[in-house]
Image (spheres, helix red, strand yellow):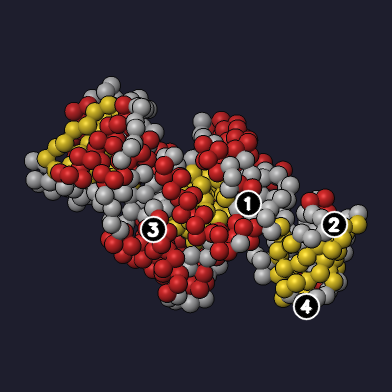
Amino acid sequence: MRATKIVATLGPASSSPEILEAMIRAGVDVVRLNFSHGKAQDHIDRAALVRAAAARAGKEVAIMADLQGPKIRVGKFEGGRTELTNGQRFVLDASRTEPGNNEVVGLDYKDLPRDVKPGDTLLLNDGLIRLTVDLVIGDQVQTTVVVGGELSNNKGINKAGGGLTAPALTAKDMEDIKTAMSFQCDYLAVSFPKSATDMEMARQLANVAGEPWRHKPALIAKIERSEAIPVLDQILRASDGIMVARGDLAVEVGNAAVPALQKRMIRMAREMDKVAITATQMMESMIVNAVPTRAEVSDVANAVLDGTDAVMLSAETAAGRYPVETIVQMAAIALEAEAADDFSIETDFTNKRFGRIDQSIAMGALFTAHHLGCKAIIALTESGSTALWMSRHNIKVPIFGLTSQGTSQRRMTLYRNVRPLLMPKLNDRDEALATAERLLVERGVLRGGDTYAITCGEPMGYPGGTNMLKVCRVG
């Protein structure tokens, strides 16, 4: 059983019911809807497509709505593109409305002239093109091309070291949150947050928009700005998880800084009982090739060994030639890395302090199951919190989160080493324990003579009430 989860982006290459179902069967746990593309109805239709494909595959998957965030981009060009050469002058003009050329282009991001000064470095098209700011006059940013190349319509702009003032949530994002809540997305990913305030605002907007359905999504902070790094702990506290968005982040902080930041962010998320997703160019070559490069295999395996909850695919499944094959390859890499992962649960618990009964029960279940060689850990949970706490620690024993809440089941699909299952809501403890055992026996997880650890709360059915650990043997 694979512990690391797979997030796949939906797009033209994966929007047919057949391909999507095949991807889910191959191992997709969470489907990402990219709100940078498409209209509101497109996302509503795709969400319905995901739910239907998951039902046919007999597997629950979560839906992540990924907000576009501010459009920090250049405008359009005559002919759609231009070629910049080293040493030439190039002007970024916020007031320009007509298409650009080899000398000047307009800006979707109108505040750029107020955010930069002479000497600043601007990075375009994911850092492939580098400009030095010479002069700012009114709405014009006059630059010199340091590293040239082809520049096409609407390519992104980053400032080395950060410092662009664009707000994390735009008017479009606020409307998109309403759309996402209309189909009750399980996760809402917020682009370019700079502070905990950005995440708190997004949560408030999502909770208000979800009120007609009594729905509150989990929030994922996409760490893409250098300003987010010094306040990472605050952003984590205001979120349910983070995405290590290595593309824009690498452009702002430099490629060399990203691997260490990735490890630090994943470690912090696990220590703070949050989830972590590692994203960007994980299997990039499989957009056009049927097999990944050796470097990509190592990259995915390294993220797994870092302890990430999930690895994410973007263009590979949205627009690539081999969306299903990419899932198969990624799942195989994750399994191999997990098998080689060396850990000590005693070391993992060193200096840990638990102030809550339910957390202590969760940790006790891990310790007991590990040393007794249990076949499974079962967490009877309403909110999914007990399964989340268990999943923050490395253990080879699979964790099954059993809940009567569909929203909790889908949320748990992102938790590392957790298999969420739906079970009836039962108020009798003994009946609930028997039902849980029967479910895992029916699925072939448990057999006669197997031992397993199970946690629940008394009285049953109250979130945060886990207070009992029991070790059982299947009769």
- How much space separates mark 3 and mark 2, taking CA atoms? 43 Å
- Comes first in the chain, label 3 or label 2: 2
280 to 59, vertically: above or below = below
Can you tell which mark lies on residue 304? 3
> Which circle's residue, 4 or 1, is located before the other in the chain?
4
Q: Is 55 or 177 nearer to us in this picture? A: 177
Describe the element under mark 4 as helix, strand or loop.
loop
Amino acid at pointer 3 = Val
Image coords of residue 290 (percent x, y): 44, 76
Neighbour tally class for label 4: few under 14, some 14-19, many 20 plus, Cα within 10 Å: some
Q: CA distance from mark 1 to mark 2?
A: 22 Å
Q: Is residue 420 visible?
A: no
Residues at badges 3 and 2 in contact (C-beta under 8 Å)?
no
Asked whether the beta carbons under mark 1 and mark 2 sit within 8 Å of each other, the answer is no
- Asked if 346 appears above or below 149 in the picture, the reply is above
Q: Amino acid at mark 2?
A: Ala
Where residue 35 is drawn, which disc sits there?
none
Report the residue marked by disc 1.
225
At label 1, the amino acid type is: Arg
- Structural crowding at the residue carrying mark 1, measured as other residues with C-alpha within 10 Å and reported as few (<14), some (14–19) or many (≥20): many
The alpha-carbon separation of the residues under discs 3 and 1 comes to 23 Å
User: In the image as oriented, which residue stretches furthest toward the right?
Assistant: 138
Identity of the residue furthest to the top in this view: 459
Q: Tell me the residue at 75%/72% (across/down).
A: 146
Looking at the rendering, which quadrant does residue 352 occupy? top left
